[in-house]
Amino acid sequence: FYGEVNPVWLAGRKQLNELIVANKQLADQASFDKAST
């Protein structure tokens, strides 16, 4: 691991995390919709 963190890697990492969170919210929403029908 390098002394300084690669900003490109950091940005990609952040984007990936946001994508995972968004997918989880979508999945939660979908299962919630199923439960309410």
Image (cartoon, rainbow, N blue to C red):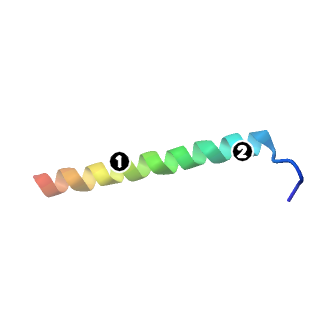
Front label number (2 vs 1): 2
What crowding class fits label 2: few (fewer than 14 Cα within 10 Å), some (14-19), or many (20 or more)? few
The secondary structure type at the circle numbered 2 is helix
Q: Is residue 23 left or right of residue 4?
A: left
Give the number of the disc on residue 26: 1
Q: Quadrant of residue 35?
A: bottom left
Q: Which residue lies furthest to the left in this view?
A: 37
Q: Where is residue 8 in the image (x, y as percent from the top left)?
A: 76, 40
Q: Which residue lies furthest to the front in this view?
A: 3
Q: Is residue 8 left or right of residue 34?
A: right
> What residue lies at 86% left-to-right and 48% top-to-bottom?
4
What crowding class fits label 1: few (fewer than 14 Cα within 10 Å), some (14-19), or many (20 or more)? few
- In this figure, what is the number of numbered marks? 2
Looking at the image, residue 31 lies above or below residue 14? below
> What residue lies at 34% left-to-right and 53% top-to-bottom?
27
For the residues bearing labels 2 and 1, Cβ distance under 8 angstroms: no
Give the number of the disc on residue 15: none
The secondary structure type at the circle numbered 1 is helix
The amino acid pointed to by label 2 is: Leu
Looking at the image, residue 23 lies above or below residue 11? below
Q: Residue furthest right?
A: 3
**Distance (Cα) linking label 2 and label 1:** 24 Å
Q: Position of residue 21 (x, y in %)?
A: 46, 49
> What residue lies at 28% left-to-right and 49% top-to-bottom?
29
Going from the N terminus, do you reach mark 2 or mark 1 first? 2
Q: Position of residue 5 (x, y in %)?
A: 81, 47
User: If the image is split into quadrants, where does the N terminus sit?
Assistant: bottom right
Q: Disc 2 designates what residue?
A: 10
The amino acid pointed to by label 1 is: Leu
